[in-house]
Image (tube, rainbow, N blue to C red):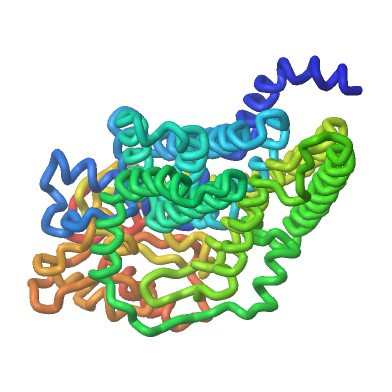
Amino acid sequence: MNKILNRFSKYEKFLFLAVALANLIPVISHHFFPTLDGPAHLYNATLINHMLFDADVDSFFQFNAELVPNLTGHVLLCFFKWFLPGYLAEKMLLIVYFIGLAYAFRRLVKSINPEYLGLSYLIFPLTYNFLLSLGFYNFSLGLIGLLLILSFWIRNKETITGSPKKILILSVLFILTYFSHILMFSIALLVCGFYLFMSFLKVLFETKKFKDTFIREGKKGLVLLLSSLIPLVLTTLYFGSRPDTGVKIFLPKEELIKWLNYLNPIICYHEGIESGFTRKIIYILYALIIGGIIVRIRNGISSTKTPEKKGFLQFNDTWLLVTGIMLVLLFIMPDDNGSASIISMRFGLLFFLFLFIWISSLKQAKWFAFICMSLLLAIHAKRIRYYDSVMDTYDPIAISCNKASAFIKPNSVVAPMNLTGFWFEAHFSNYLGSDKSMVILDNYEATMNYFPLLWNMPELPNFHMGGQRVADCPLFPWTPSNKENEKKEVDYVFALGSWDSTNVDHLKTLELISSNFIQTYKNEHCTLYRRKNSRE
């Protein structure tokens, strides 16, 4: 068996590439890969490109003067959109994420346990997670930065103090990770610092020379601090401009424990269906942990016959301690603190990421690891087929929204409604602007102060629809408006879903639209209305 596995290891890198490509099937087999916030990111990338080279929407939007740590995803989308249509730009971003995360994890495993590189397949189930389904592209790209920083630090911390080039590379990695997501930067710095502290204790235990060890490891700490100085200053300024609201919401501990038992952070769409997959993955994790402990005990017994006796705990168990830190943060941090939300799910995902790293650092019987990874990939293949079927449902809706944009004049003002009432489709109207500049009044990014674009409130018109303020209509709850400025009638009304004849708000809004607008496009998913006195 070992001979077969040794021969197979020569070609294993091609298998990893094949799995990484197969993991993309739900992305590349559909026109769009719909997520909750993804359409908004794509739309705002369109606006950014137009505002850089065309001033037609400057009276509605303005660039955020603050260098917010949510830029990387937008920069990539803007870049890809220079030469690709919106749907392909989004696809390229997702390919960067899926391939980048897989190989960043593999590089980290190679840094800490190169003999068991096959355990790097653990990352594939984690690539599809709840936060990705929410369209948290910057957070997702930040995961790549986190893993690259950790692998670079592990590989180079012993020689980095004498290498300006390596210090510069580490600084760039920290900056890029910060501008992807501030939490990923913070975790990367925390873990690098903790890893350095554990290295200090290890060397001190071996040499018993406190002064020499403190000076040598202290220099590395100064390099770490210097390399992260720019994003550290930006982090201080970021939180300094956002005072604590005092509002904190915590999830029940029972809910968090359930997440640990069913791997909820990687459940994307339907807990009832996906928990069947995730529970089996949990069993494989248990098996790998037990298998690693058994191998360690056996090696410990055999080492008693040699002069160099090793203890049960090993330096790679640092990753287990980091996993424990993430577990503590999961239970003590609020899920919402007034300025950020869905915090618990982020720490839940980080808990499992570092658990996977620790498991990947364990030595295993190679035949046992091969069986576990084979079972893991078989289960994940079923997840991929399920996600592919989910995209079969939502991709046609996204395409329908995008097709309606052909009937909208560039730079027009569009008031969208989501009549489906389904939260996942809340921003699907933004697919209207994936390739064309327009002012879509449901732009949640522009209402927040941690994205590149903001509403230009001083110059924003007082939007009306048939003589009535759009913001006063219950079906347009997020419409921005400035009552002090002149009235402006919206050019189009977009409705996703069907009208409910039993809903009073639906009937009143439909009556208002019928009096002032003309239906100009309709398909099975959405309807577009044009103002009567406006011209195409």
Q: Is residue 347 above or below residue 357?
A: below
In the depicted view, which residue is nearer to us: 21 or 212? 212
Residue 235 visible in this rendered orientation of the protein = yes
Name the side, left or right, on which 454 lies relative to 225. left
Name the side, left or right, on which 244 lies relative to 24. left
Q: Quadrant of residue 235?
A: bottom left
Percent across and percent down for residue 484 are 9, 78
Name the side, left or right, on which 39 lies relative to 278. left
Percent across and percent down for residue 71 are 31, 48
Task: Residue at 60%, 52% (x, y): give it.
Answer: 129
Task: Residue at 88%, 36% (x, y): give it.
Answer: 305
Percent across and percent down for residue 469 are 23, 77
Name the side, left or right, on which 237 lies relative to 380. left
Percent across and percent down for residue 43 are 33, 49
In the depicted view, which residue is nearer to us: 222 or 328? 222
Residue 132 visible in this rendered orientation of the protein = no
